[in-house]
């Protein structure tokens, strides 16, 4: 197996409650800040919690696809991690939200992509492509939150 990880952080000029509300509302706001995401539908439980699953449609590089992702870690208002699998590739994105006490909020992202099977041979290159694709994710989140 080959693994690629990267981290990003951003400070958003909004309260932690506002940031959290946008961050976990994938159905409403996800297409605004998650590149390529077209639609998201929650499958099952409300509100978002550990084990909540979502169905997604994406258009990337001229191709439309669909899949599911699941909440694999959750602490209300503080931390959420979602994971998806496409064949031998599993991606997990963990977001942490920290109120700075002065009206702004820091969001930290820790992303991990695991390449199994034959994908492990292209993992190092593919991992860098994933990182480049998602490098502005938190800036897009900031823009989305600050427009709410």
Image (cartoon, grey):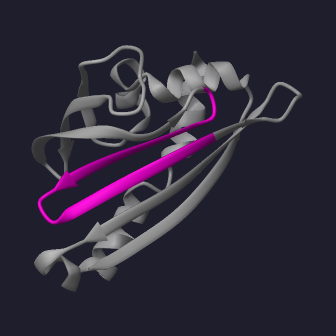
Q: Is residue 11 left or right of residue 125?
A: right
Determine whether 129 is above or below 135 in the image: below
Foreground residue among 136 and 105 = 105
Residue beneath the point at 70% across and 26% down: 16
Q: Which residue, as the protein is rendered here, is positioned at the far bottom?
A: 121
Foreground residue among 4 and 44 = 44
Residue beneath the point at 55% across and 20% down: 21
Numbered range of the magenta stretch: 77-96
Residue beneath the point at 30% across and 38% down: 70
Where is residue 17? Give x, y as percent. 66, 20
Where is residue 29? Give x, y as percent. 42, 23
Where is residue 105? Give x, y as percent. 73, 34
- Quarter of the rendering containing residue 34: top left
Is residue 59 highlighted in magenta?
no
Where is residue 66? Give x, y as percent. 12, 39
Residue 145 in sight in this render: yes
Residue beneath the point at 33% across and 81% down: 124
Is residue 92 highlighted in magenta?
yes
Determine whether 147 is above or below 73 in the image: above
- Quarter of the rendering containing residue 11: top right
Q: Quadrant of the N terminus?
A: bottom left
**Magenta stretch secondary structure, dominant:** strand
Determine whether 15 is above or below 93 in the image: above
Residue 146 in sight in this render: no
The mark total stands at 0
């Amino acid at each position: 197996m080959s693994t690629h990880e990267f981290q990003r952080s951003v400070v958003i000029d909004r309260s932690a409650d506002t940031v959290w509300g946008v961050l976990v509302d994938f159905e409403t706001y996800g297409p605004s800040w998650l590149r390529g995401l077209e639609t998201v539908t929650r499958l099952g439980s409300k509100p978002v919690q550990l084990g909540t699953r979502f169905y997604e449609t994406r258009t990337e590089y001229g191709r439309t696809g669909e899949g599911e992702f699941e909440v694999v870690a959750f602490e209300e208002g503080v931390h959420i991690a979602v994971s998806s699998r496409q064949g031998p590739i599993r991606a997990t994105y963990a977001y942490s939200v920290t109120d700075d006490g002065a009206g702004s909020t820091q969001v930290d992202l820790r992303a991990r992509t695991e390449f199994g099977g034959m994908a492990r041979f292209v993992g190092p290159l593919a991992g860098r492509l994933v990182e480049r694709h998602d490098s502005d994710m938190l800036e897009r989140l900031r823009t989305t939150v600050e427009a709410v």
